[in-house]
Image (cartoon, grey):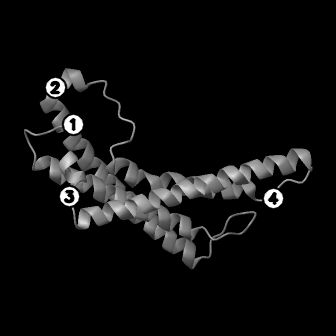
């Protein structure tokens, strides 16, 4: 997979886009930390809780996770459980990774499609959060975008893996 990460052109542009989304994720996480800090201070020191802070944290955490996942995958920095790797050997691991990437691509594509439909429904019916009445369709749209990009990353890695039989180093 190392060859894939160093190619120029469309792949480099994709990495740049995914990097940008991950940075947005980091900024949202920073904003959540600030919000929680201020909220705790206001609640316990000033006896004035920030109404709706829980909703903002919940929406923000969805964005943090979803926007960072594709970039984490493309950089191979996700958590990997390799309990069976030694028992399976290189060929078994290769096949397991093929199956994992293929199934994950399909499932994520389906989830992205359903999330897109949910975003459109939320937009059409003006669905909002309970307390602050913030529209929720942008969060569903971010989930759909992230899952689509994640599925695309896995699909590209799958294709690259299929074309590199015998040179597998992931």
- Residue 116 at x, y percent in the picture: 44, 68
- Residue 168 at x, y percent in the picture: 14, 39
The numbered mark, 3 or 2, whose residue comes first in the sequence reads: 3
> Disc number at residue 96?
1
Q: How far apart are marks 3 and 4 (CA)?
A: 48 Å
24 or 117: nearer the viewer: 24
- Residue extending furthest left? 166
The numbered mark, 3 or 1, whose residue comes first in the sequence reads: 3
- Residue extending furthest bottom? 124
Tell us which disc is closer to us: 3 or 1. Answer: 3
The numbered mark, 2 or 4, whose residue comes first in the sequence reads: 4
The numbered mark, 2 or 1, whose residue comes first in the sequence reads: 2
Q: Mark 2 points at which residue?
A: 89
- Residue 84 at x, y percent in the picture: 26, 24
Tell us which disc is closer to us: 2 or 1. Answer: 2
Q: Distance between the residues labelled 2 and 4?
A: 55 Å
Residue sitting at x 67%, y 69%: 134
Vertical comparison of 73 with 116: above or below: above
Q: Residue 145: which quarter of the image?
A: bottom left
Q: Name the residue under label 3.
A: 7
């Amino acid at each position: 997979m190392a060859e894939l990460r160093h190619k120029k052109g469309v792949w480099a542009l994709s990495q740049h886009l995914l990097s940008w989304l991950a940075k947005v994720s980091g900024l949202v996480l920073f904003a959540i930390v600030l919000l929680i800090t201020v909220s705790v201070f206001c609640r316990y020191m000033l006896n004035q809780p920030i109404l709706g802070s829980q909703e903002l944290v919940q929406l923000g955490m969805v964005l943090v996770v979803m926007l960072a996942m594709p970039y984490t995958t493309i950089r191979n920095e996700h958590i990997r459980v390799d309990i069976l790797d030694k028992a399976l050997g290189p060929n078994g691991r290769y096949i397991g990774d093929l199956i994992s990437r293929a199934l994950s691509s399909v499932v994520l594509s389906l989830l992205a499609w359903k999330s897109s439909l949910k975003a459109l429904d939320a937009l059409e019916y003006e669905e909002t959060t309970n307390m602050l009445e913030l529209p929720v369709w942008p969060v569903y749209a971010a989930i759909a975008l992230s899952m689509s990009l994640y599925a695309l990353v896995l699909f590209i890695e799958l294709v690259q893996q299929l074309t590199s039989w015998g040179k597998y180093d992931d």
